[in-house]
Image (cartoon, rainbow, N blue to C red):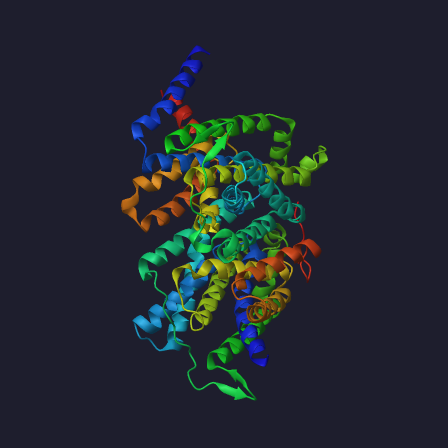
């Protein structure tokens, strides 16, 4: 117990001093983006990881949240109202998509969400008076609530870390609730879950909605910390990248989702020199992980550790 | 009007061919191949490499492309499907997505990002009937589609192997029990499914230009067509494909050309809400 507290304390110190090591600039912005992706992927983990449904709409939910905040705060709405609006817009969109399709076989949600992603992208590009078209929205006001204004990337970092911590705690609580067990039962066998009294359609719709709200809220933070949004950040390609972050991190693992998102957002910065080959290797790595370690790194690492211990 | 109908049907025929390839694989192994559009793109570029870069006669380039696509379908199956047999289908679907990323970026490395054009096998002056123009390539598209439909129908209902494939799609385990070499039928499904995607690419490239990122949206349209037609139903896919081609062409002309690519998805979402099993009913039974 004491060592656990010590490790936790050390981690907290490490997280606290990172910004002063990086300094204000590009790297801290990438780190902020990584934390935001972690929240979005945590949301995706509810519907894909726990409940086993493929959702390609997560980037679109993220985009809806970001544009809701961008449009609302540029029009003068208070930031907290924009935050609420972002979550609400994403939740409504997820219900509209989930209710008709989650009664059907699993690939229908996959296709509908892909279609939805494409529609959102086209609307963001062509509804120029409101969304700014391909050039997007600029100079979005920063986070400001309870008399605080979060201007710098460094200050945003601490806010985002706090938001991620809340997101993780909430996810852990849900995971260990009866609803969490219902989601996993639905993934493992819908028939068995139904027989045990789980309303699987309701569970699937709720899982999708919670995930969409995560994405919508993260979208709000994205708009008000990066200050600039354009349709490029919310395409189906981004949705696929979010899914692969979850797969490589470990579907169904909360810590795996966080690690996968942060790792795979930072990784391209280190592998710039690979250029076009990066995505080729990336796709191949995803295939390899699914084939050889379907639980992702979250399951592979403990396996390796136990094997090493056994060998000793 | 007449011109829009011809153009719409030509576009729709291509959607139908790609959807037929998708369904050939789906009906056999119950896996939706999300890389079908990228296979189509490879077909287009293999055709261009043959006919433009190496200046082969266009008919010969077509044959080489289709044979290469069959081989590629087998490789695809070996990487994406076989290692994951019996695992949850959503994992296999995700490997097809990842394979799509790999293929698209390999194509970007090999052929570069610039759009390229492929000549049509039939060149000549377009035919005119009372104001409606029918280009030589549209004749190629219509005759190829008619040929493919006839050939696929004859293959599935009149040949021993086709009937074995239908049996496999109805119940893989029972098919194996009655002595059908299931692995062989699955391999043929992937080879032919990939060749049909390649054929779609060869037909599309002379109308729109070919570029490595062309696959994504065309693959999605093939799913939409399959969903609207009732997943698994071949006649459904053909009718839905032709209808989508018409809707897109008329929608682009009379409603908005900006949202051309959105019509397909809007229609799909409406169809799913109103007739969840598609217009022609899902063919394959639900498996528990």
Residue A120 spot, x, y in % from top left: 53, 52
- What quarter of the picture does the C terminus of chain B occupy? top right
Going by the image, does A199 lie left or right of B198? right
Camera-nearest residue between A303 and B247: B247
Camera-nearest residue between A285 and A43: A43
Q: State the residue at coordinates (37%, 37%).
A: A29
- What quarter of the picture does the N terminus of chain B occupy? bottom right
Camera-nearest residue between A135 and B238: A135
Q: Is residue B267 above or below residue B131?
A: above
Residue B284 seen anywhere in this rendered image of the structure: no
- Report the residue that reaches farthest toward the top: A2
Q: State the residue at coordinates (42%, 73%).
A: B206
Where residue B114 sits, quadrant-wise, is bottom left
Q: State the residue at coordinates (58%, 42%).
A: A90
Q: Disc count in the image? A: 0
Q: In this view, does B208 lie above or below B274?
A: below
Residue A202 seen anywhere in this rendered image of the structure: yes
Going by the image, does B278 lie left or right of B147? right
Residue B194 spot, x, y in % from top left: 47, 62
Going by the image, does B247 lie left or right of A258? right
Where residue A269 sits, quadrant-wise, is top left
Residue B284 spot, x, y in % from top left: 65, 56
Residue A23 spot, x, y in % from top left: 30, 30
Q: In this view, does A171 lie above or below B127?
A: above
Camera-nearest residue between A48 and B256: B256
- Report the residue that reaches farthest toward the left: A273
């Amino acid at each position: 117990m004491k060592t656990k507290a010590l490790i936790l304390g050390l981690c907290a110190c490490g997280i606290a001093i990172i910004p002063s090591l990086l300094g204000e600039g590009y790297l801290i912005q990438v780190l902020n983006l990584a934390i935001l992706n972690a929240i979005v992927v945590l949301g995706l983990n509810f519907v894909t990881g726990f409940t086993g449904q493929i959702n390609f709409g997560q980037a679109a939910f993220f985009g809806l949240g970001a544009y809701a905040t961008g449009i609302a705060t540029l029009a003068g709405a208070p930031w907290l109202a924009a935050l609420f609006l972002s979550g609400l817009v994403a939740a409504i969109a997820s219900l509209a998509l989930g209710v008709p399709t989650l009664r059907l076989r699993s690939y229908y949600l996959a296709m509908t969400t892909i279609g939805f992603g494409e529609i959102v992208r086209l609307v963001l590009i062509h509804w120029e008076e409101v969304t700014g078209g391909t050039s997007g929205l600029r100079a979005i006001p920063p986070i400001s609530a309870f008399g605080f204004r979060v201007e710098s990337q460094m200050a945003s970092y601490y806010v985002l870390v706090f938001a991620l911590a809340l997101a993780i705690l909430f996810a852990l609580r849900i995971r260990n609730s009866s609803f969490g067990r219902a989601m996993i039962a639905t993934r493992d066998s819908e028939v068995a879950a139904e027989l045990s009294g789980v309303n699987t359609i309701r569970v699937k719709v709720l899982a999708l909605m919670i995930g969409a709200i995560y994405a919508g809220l993260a979208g709000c933070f994205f708009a008000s910390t990066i200050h600039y949004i354009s349709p490029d950040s919310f395409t189906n390609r981004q949705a696929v990248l979010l899914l692969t972050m979850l797969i490589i991190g470990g579907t169904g693992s909360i810590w795996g989702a966080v690690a996968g998102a942060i790792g795979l957002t930072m990784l391209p910065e280190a592998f710039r020199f690979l250029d076009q080959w990066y995505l080729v290797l990336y796709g191949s790595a995803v295939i390899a992980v699914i084939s050889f370690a379907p639980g992702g790194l979250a399951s592979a690492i403990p396996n390796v550790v136990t094997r090493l211990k056994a060998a000793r | 009007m007449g011109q829009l109908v011809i153009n719409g049907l030509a576009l729709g025929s291509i959607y139908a061919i790609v959807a037929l390839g998708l369904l050939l694989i789906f009906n056999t192994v119950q896996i939706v191949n999300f890389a079908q559009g990228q296979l189509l793109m490879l077909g287009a570029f293999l055709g261009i490499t043959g006919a433009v870069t190496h200046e082969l006669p266009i008919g010969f380039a077509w044959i080489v492309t289709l044979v290469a696509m069959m081989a590629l379908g087998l490789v695809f199956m070996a990487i994406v499907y076989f290692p994951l047999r019996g695992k949850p289908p959503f994992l296999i679907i995700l490997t097809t997505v990842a394979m799509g990323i790999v293929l698209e970026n390999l194509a970007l490395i090999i052929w570069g990002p610039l759009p390229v054009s492929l000549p049509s096998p039939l060149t000549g002056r377009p035919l005119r009937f009372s104001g409606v123009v029918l280009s030589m390539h549209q004749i190629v598209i219509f005759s190829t589609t008619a040929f493919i439909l006839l050939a696929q129908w004859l293959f599935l209902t009149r040949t021993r192997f086709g009937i074995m494939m239908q049996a496999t799609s109805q119940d893989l385990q029972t098919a194996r029990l009655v002595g059908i070499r299931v692995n062989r039928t699955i391999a043929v499904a992937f080879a032919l499914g990939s060749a049909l995607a390649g054929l779609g690419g060869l037909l599309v490239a002379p109308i729109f230009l070919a570029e490595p990122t062309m696959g994504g949206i065309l693959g999605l349209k093939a799913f939409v067509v399959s969903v609207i037609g009732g997943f698994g139903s071949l006649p459904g896919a053909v009718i839905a494909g032709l209808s989508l081609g018409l809707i897109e062409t008329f929608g682009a002309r009379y409603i908005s050309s900006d949202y051309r690519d959105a019509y397909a998805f809007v229609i799909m979402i409406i169809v799913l809400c109103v007739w969840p099993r598609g217009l022609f009913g899902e063919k394959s039974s639900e498996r528990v």
